[in-house]
Image: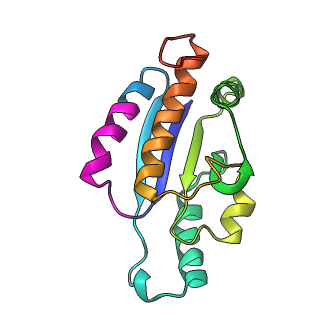
Amino acid sequence: MKIQLWSVGKPNESFVKEGIELFTKRISNYYAVEWKVIPMPKNAGKLEANILKIKEGEIILSSLLKDDYLILLDERGKSFTSEALSNFIEQRAGESLKNVIFLIGGAFGVSEFVIQRANFKWSLSNLVFPHQLVRLILAEQIYRACSISRNEQYHHV
């Protein structure tokens, strides 16, 4: 199974880049992993929020393969404990999925078409975070989940 971490927006800022790279490298000890930063459409700042979500959604949907398992990060999604996330990832691996994609949408969320395509909606928190920090938190939480599944010492109960 390959874990793909997708995010709409700009490349990583230097203040989070090092942490994202560290946790991504650690995840690679368990699964193949890669990041994909989906650039915002041209003239994004001049578009209405709804139009922007549709355009971003078209880019996202055109990048997905039919069998990709899409996990949408959404504040209305299901919450997990770290242990439950570990079990969730293990279950996906047990299903022999080729690609599991965690998607961080744009500043205004994602289009209804992307929501409908998502196989699962996950709420990282009830709080709202800047996209750059969500990338770092996501990478760390996936690494933590992997370490839990192997009974390693990173996660302390």
Return the residue nearer the eye: 73 or 156.
156
* Residue at 53% across, 33% down: 142
Colour scheme: rainbow
Task: Specify whether 106 is left or right of 157.
Answer: left
Task: Specify whether 119 is left or right of 11.
Answer: right
Q: Is residue 31 visible?
A: yes
Dominant SS of magenta comes to helix
Image coordinates of residue 124 in percent, x first then y, are: 61, 46
Write down the quadrant of residue 67 in the picture: top right
Return the residue nearer the eye: 11 or 132.
132
Task: Specify whether 75 is left or right of 139.
Answer: right
How many numbered circles does the render carry? 0
Residue 20 lies within the magenta run: yes
Q: For the C terminus, which image quadrant?
A: top right
Return the residue nearer the eye: 64 or 148.
148
Write down the quadrant of residue 146 in the picture: top right
Name the outermost residue toward the left.
Answer: 14
Residue 11 lies within the magenta run: yes
Image coordinates of residue 60 in percent, x first then y, are: 55, 62
Image coordinates of residue 33 in percent, x first then y, are: 45, 35
Q: For the N terminus, which image quadrant?
A: top right
Q: Is residue 119 visible?
A: no
User: Which residues lie in the magenta part?
Assistant: 10-24
* Residue at 39% across, 32% down: 23
* Residue at 48% across, 42% down: 137
Image coordinates of residue 132 in percent, x first then y, are: 40, 54
